[in-house]
Image (tube, rainbow, N blue to C red):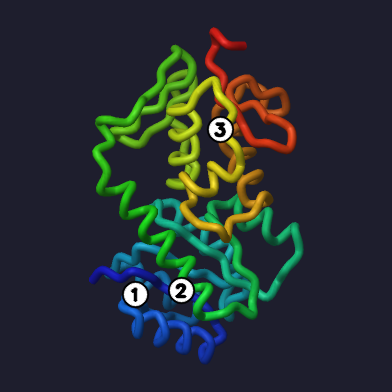
Amino acid sequence: MRYDCLIIDDEKELADNTCEYFNMFEVKTAAVYSSAEANTFLSSNEPALVLLDINLSDGSGFELCKKIRQTLNIPILFISARNTDDDKIIALNIGGDDYIEKPYSLGVLLAKVKVVLKRFSNVADSDNSKKEGFDDGYLKLDPVNKTVFVNGEEKKITSIELKLLEYLIENKNRLVTKNEIFDKVWNDKFTTDGTLNVHIRKIREAIEKDPQDPKYIVTVWKEGYKFVTAGDN
């Protein structure tokens, strides 16, 4: 069965309230309360998005995220009362698309979830054959098959990172501001500089020969980023 959202949170009352609220607004949602229940649910159901707590009664949300990422490339938004930068960086580094602190407003969370669902629906429904690919002999991006190869080796990146890389390539050799990225890639006003910075770093780690001295994705200080082709280096 297909769902818009799966909530994985051992705070049962909060999870149930969030689930009920989402369903009221026609975002088809289910809630489970442990890693084991999540694994069982995912074996026979297909959520379009996951809201995942870090602290689960039978394990870590971080480990569950890694496991989900082995088979599914859907948005994973962490929801947690833990608010340290280290937790946020870990969550994004292991495949999370965003990090939402508890306590959260049900209305704001629903708005964010709807935006993410719309964004990924638009990606799935778009005619990718019209998108601009890239192949310079070292880095290859195939927008039809949604694959990235570096020196002949396929690199695994998340859907949001692929969309971000595609957008930078479509606008190569010009400054793309952070606000433009938030508007065109994330399509929402909730994303932070920190989230963007982590995803840029992860893309660099995947495609750059030296992520500390990037040649493709260049930072324009305080402004944004530029994807630079070899001829423009």
**Which residue is rendered at x = 42% and y = 22% of the image?**
140
Q: Is residue 115 above or below residue 58?
A: above
**Which residue is rendered at x = 61% and y = 42% of the image?**
178
CA separation in Å, label 2 and label 1: 9 Å
Q: Which residue in the protein does label 2 denote?
A: 110
Q: Which residue in the protein does label 1 denote?
A: 27
**Which residue is rendered at x = 68% and y = 54% of the image?**
89
Q: Nearer the viewer, residue 208 or 216?
A: 216
- Amino acid residing under circle 3: Ala
CA separation in Å, label 1 and label 3: 34 Å
Within 10 Å of disc 3 (Cα), the crowding (few <14, some 14-19, many 20+) is some
- Amino acid residing under circle 1: Val
Q: Mark 1 or mark 2, which is nearer the start of the sequence? A: 1
State the SS at label 2: helix
Q: Is residue 51 above or below residue 66?
A: below
Which dot marks residue 206? Answer: 3
Evaluate if marks 1 and 3 touch, with contact meaning CB atoms under 8 Å apart: no
Q: Nearer the viewer, residue 35 or 209?
A: 209
State the SS at label 1: loop
Location of residue 59 (image quadrant): bottom right
Q: Nearer the viewer, mark 2 or mark 3?
A: 2
- Amino acid residing under circle 2: Leu
Q: Is residue 145 left or right of residue 12?
A: left
